[in-house]
Each structure stands twice: as structure tokens, then as C-alpha cells.
Amino acid sequence: MNFTDQTVIVTGGGSGIGRAAALRFAELGANLAVVDRNPDAAAETAAKAGPKALAVTADVSDSASVRAMVTSVVDAFGRIDVLCNNAGFGFPGTVLEIDEDSWDQLMAVNVKGVFLCSKHCIPELAKTGEGRIVNTSSYTAAVGIPDRAAYVASKGAVSALTRAMALDHVGQGIRVNAVAPGTVNSPYFAKMIDQSPNPQALLDELNGRAPMERMGRPEEIAEAIVWLASRESSFATGSVLTIDGGTSAW
């Protein structure tokens, strides 16, 4: 895989899966835009990625912010070839426990963010004749898990939107796919373990979610993202690639 002379945007690129994907794209020669609402995190990833990386501070849930992000990337690199919609977050709760503001905030980032970034990038992606979008969904979109109602609903929407966009934009030469990770050893879970009254018990629980008896590594999900974004996956569109250590096979 080679991304030389191609421009790749990774949202949520300041940490976790997003950072791992951004660094992998940089290794493969891409002009890289690391997008995060945390400017320090974006800058740190861009510094690690090297001289062809641009740190962009943006809120993917805000249309004006996304438009400004697209403008800054085009101004810097002249084109956009790949958009990785990775920004997202989650929190626990059933529909009885989640308040409306929290629900709206999560949907604004996890779902509206994919919509807005795609909406404003697709005109640039179409100019290349082979634009690619990779969305980060979750295995929970297909199987569900308890006590994560808002997160599961948002990722179900991401998978559905992936298939819809794939059909809508195939005529423009744009391929749209998603990766569906299982439980990944990310900063989100590291913080959760650190704050748990029984860290070892929580770690054992998280590792036990998968038949492989461990969490995934951000770098493992990054490889799937990069493949879906590459020319090597040229016959894939509308696909949701599950990388979950066998969890959804149970």
C-alpha cells in the first residue's frame, strides 16, 4: 500500500485508533491532516507523523468548523483523497438513565460528525475520481451490548449511513466503507480501568469479551482502516469490516 501524493484526513486523530491510523498513513507516504477538537492532541500526533502532517483543530459536530477544516486541508495540500471519520465517544446508560443533553451530544459527534465531514469532503473527493471514505463503526452495531444504549444506537446509524453513502456516491468514483472494532485497549478504557475500584476485575472482564481473551490494539484496527482506504481494496464499497477478536461470532 502506498499513499504518496494522496491527502488523508483522520478525525479523532489525537489518540487511540485515530492516532494509530494517522501514524500508519504517514508511514505509507500520505499527506496527512490530523483533526481533533483537542489542539494539543492533534499537534502531538502530527509531530509524531512527520513533516507531511498538518494538525487541525475542529469540532466535527459543527458545520462551520468542518467547512473551515476542509478549506485548511485543501489550502495546504491541494486535494483530499481519503476521509477517515473516526471521531466519536461513548458513555454508559440505558434509555431510562441517559438524559437528553447527553444523548444529543453523543449523536452530534458520532453520527452528525460523519454526516458533516462527508458532506463537505465529498465534492473534493469526487475531483480525484477515486475518493475513499472509511467510517469507524463498532461491532455493537450488529450485536448490541447492555448499558450502552446511546453508543450502540449511534454506531448502528454509522453502519447504515456507510451503506447509504456507498450507493449514493459510487457513480462519482467514491468508495465508502466502515470498520467495526471490538473492545480496543485505548485511552478510554485505560482511564476506565485506572478509575475502577477493582482494576484487575475490570481488565479481566474486558479481555474476556472476545474468544481471543484479549482486547484489540489500536494498531490492529488501524491496519483495517488503511486497507479500506487503499487502492488495494478497490472492489469494496458499502462494507462493514468487523475486527473484534471473534466477539460477534459468539
Image: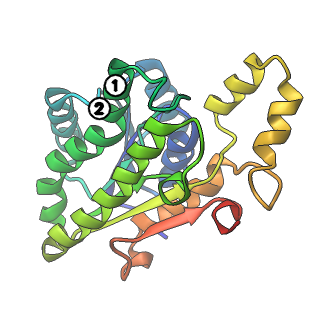
User: What residue sits right under mark 1 in the picture?
Assistant: 105
Which quadrant of the figure has residue 237?
Answer: bottom left
Q: Amino acid at mark 2?
A: Ala
Which quadrant of the figure has residue 181?
Answer: bottom right
**Residue placed farthest to the bottom in the image?**
235
Identify the mark at residue 108; answer none if there is no mark. 2
**Residue density around tag 2, few if under 14, some if 14–19, many if 20 or more, within 10 Å:** many
> From mark 1 to mark 2, how far is it between C-alphas?
5 Å
Q: Secondary structure at mark 2?
A: helix
In the picture shown, does residue 118 fall above or below 132? above
Which quarter of the rendering shows the C terminus? bottom right
As rendered, which of 204 and 169 lies closer to the eye?
204
Q: Amino acid at mark 1?
A: Gln
Q: Secondary structure at mark 1?
A: helix
Question: Where is residue 92 drawn, in percent x and y?
Answer: 56, 29
Whether residues under marks 1 and 2 lie with C-beta atoms below 8 angstroms apart, the answer is yes
What sort of colour scheme is used for the picture?
rainbow
Question: Where is residue 25 drawn, in percent x and y?
Answer: 48, 54
Question: Where is residue 159 drawn, in percent x and y?
Answer: 38, 58
**Residue placed farthest to the right in the image?**
200
